[in-house]
Image (spheres, rainbow, N blue to C red):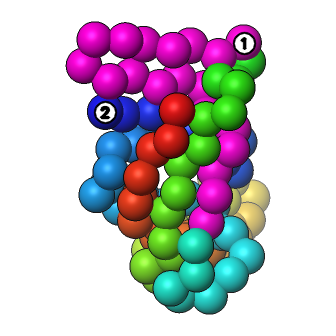
Amino acid sequence: MYAIVETGGKQYRVQPGDIIRVERLPGETGEEVLFDKVLLVADGQEVKVGQPVVEGAKVKGVIVKQDRGRKVIVFKFKRRKRYHRKRGHRQYFTAVKIEEINA
């Protein structure tokens, strides 16, 4: 069984037991998270597609980690103008372990 959920403006294909990295969610490690924007639910034979969401479908997960991603270097440069800017960025993320899918 799998589902497609939307969170943080992105869509994720999830199965029970998966660990996904999503945009930062409020909460501490060990707290339960409920995704209610479920776009599709599929189990072996039947596929339910929402318009835009599947009614009554929910995906439960547990927060595993609140952290920041790897550093990304942003470098701007204009040749012959003595212009260069170097900045770093680390995006916050939440690691969530998917517990169950209720359709």
Q: Residue at x 73, y 18 (%)?
A: 52
Q: Residue at x 50, y 85 (%)?
A: 30
- Residue 12, can we see it? no
Magenta stretch mostly in which secondary structure? strand
Total label count?
Answer: 2
Left or right: 83 with respect to 45?
A: right
Asked if the magenta segment contains residue 90, the reply would be: no
List the residue tagged with mark 1.
51
Residue projecting furthest to the left: 44
Q: Point out residue 46 in the picture as x, y percentages from the top left corner.
A: 37, 12
Q: Residue at x 45, y 44 (%)?
A: 101
Front residue of 103 and 86: 103
List the residue tagged with mark 2.
1
Q: Residue at x 65, y 16 (%)?
A: 50
Q: Tell me the element at label 1.
A: loop
Q: Type of residue at label 2?
A: Met
Q: Type of residue at label 1?
A: Gln
Circle on res. 29: none
Q: Point out residue 10 in the picture as x, y percentages from the top left corner.
A: 62, 40
On-image quarter of the N terminus: top left
Q: Point out residue 54 in the picture as x, y percentages from the top left corner.
A: 65, 24
Q: Residues within 10 Å of mark 2 (few under 14, many from 20)?
A: some
Bounds of the magenta segment: 33-51
